[in-house]
Amino acid sequence: MRRTFVPLVALLLLLAALATADLALAAPGQGFCRDLRHRLVRGGGQASGLFVIEAGSGKAVCARAARKSRPLASNTKIFTTATALGRFGPDARLTTKVLASGKVDRNGVLHGDLYLEGAGDPVLGSPAFYDAFLGLGTNLYALKRQIVARAEIKSVSGRLYADDTIFDRLRGVADSGYATSPYIGPLSGLSFNAGFGDSHAAAFSSDPARLAARKLGAALRGAGVAVKPEVALGDADDAQTHAIASVDSPTINAIVNSTDINSNNFFAEMLLKLLGAHYGSGGSTAAGAAVVEQYARGRGSSVHAVDGSGLTRANRASPLQVVRFLDGMRRTEVEDEFIGDLALAGHEGTVADRMHGTAANGRCRVKTGTLTGVSNLSGYCFTGGKTMIFSVLMGSVGDLGLAHAEQDRIAAAVAAY
């Protein structure tokens, strides 16, 4: 009897240590945490983790498998959009330009070419499209008025070129073999109508840059400017050009807001390439992902970023890393914008129909994430003068409705903590 008693005690102590290996929890929170862990596993299966802290004190109030890295799905957008806000600044805008080579004579003839130079603006398009589908946009046709009225061009001896060189010409991300995917319109440094071929969003364009140039050319001809209908790809930097027209996008903050609230994959991927173009080694998905990873490290966290939207399963982080990043964003100059751009529970976007009648309704700002077998919810809850930060990463989901229901109950409990 004596020989078996000591090993049993040691085993029990070891099990107790392992049970609290993620974090030591205060005694009053044990019941709270047991309930959250139960709901986590019930909704997401054993391959699920969570982490919850009270931000003011830094106190961890619940954890389960908090250090285990899991697929982020659209929680990847948390890292992408935060980096965009932090690096560009919330008030920055993207400027699409028309440049001209050659000079305009007294008869209004441009003896040279026109270049439509893309800035990687994800919302460039026609008002008919973006008013119907995006809710915000940059009017390509505003360039026509400047070319006609300000530059006083009546005829172009050369041709109209589309300059999309701010980005590479890979149209998708790893999930689709970098080709256009059903979930993301074709990525381009000169996009038009989010990559769709018409204002009805019926099908994607095979070449967004050429399409944008053709649309501008048609508008110019409609205004009486003689310009050839054939367009080509070209780099304005290869010619001696000067700007004759420009149009600015909505602010980066407005684009980030729509990206997060509506979980817009196309916007997220365009933002990622923009980060690569301006702050990395070039306008590619890989370059942008490296910028995001660097930014996360600067906030005391880390992430394995493969794309900007989360469609690729290799985007991974642990609940602990997500919470650390969210907490780190509270100590940046863009704290208010970043938090305000997340969807308000029960009111906006992907959580407009969730958490009604609970403590989370109107108190939590969150980001959802869904892939086959994966369902995530992370964000902030504000209650009683406290800020709670949580991340729920469910990795073996069999019933998405049940996963959402249990996530909503977890968020409600966190909001009421």
Image (cartoon, helix red, strand yellow):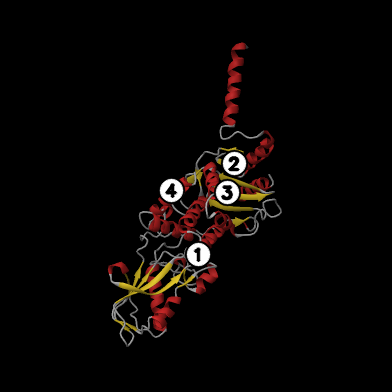
Q: Residues within 10 Å of mark 2 (few under 14, many from 20)?
A: few
Q: Residue at x 56, y 35 (%)?
A: 22
Q: Residue at x 51, y 50 (%)?
A: 73
**Which comes before the other along the chain, label 4 or label 2?**
2
**Which comes before the other along the chain, label 2 or label 1?**
2
Dot 3 and dot 4 residues touching (CB under 8 Å): no
Dot 4 and dot 2 residues touching (CB under 8 Å): no
Dot 2 and dot 3 residues touching (CB under 8 Å): no
Q: Is residue 384 left or right of residue 277?
A: right
- Amino acid at circle 1: Thr
- Amino acid at circle 2: Gly
Q: Residue at x 39, y 52 (%)?
A: 286
Q: Distance between the residues labelled 4 and 1?
A: 23 Å
Image coordinates of residue 272 in percent, x first then y, are: 44, 56
Q: Distance between the residues labelled 2 and 1?
A: 33 Å
Q: Is mark 4 on a helix, strand or loop?
A: helix
| Nearest to the observer: residue 237 or residue 268 | 237
Q: Which residue is tagged 2?
A: 58
Rendered position, 175 above or below 217? above
| Nearest to the observer: residue 198 or residue 86 | 86
Answer yes or no: is residue 71 visible: yes
Q: Which residue is tagged 4?
A: 294
Q: What element carries label 1?
A: loop
Q: How far apart are marks 3 and 4 (CA)?
A: 21 Å
Which mark is nearer the camera, 2 or 3?
A: 2
Image coordinates of residue 66 in percent, x first then y, are: 55, 39
- Amino acid at circle 3: Ser
Q: What element carries label 3?
A: strand
Which mark is nearer the camera, 3 or 1?
A: 1
Q: Which residue is tagged 3?
A: 378
Question: For residue 251, which numbered disc appears in the image?
Answer: 1
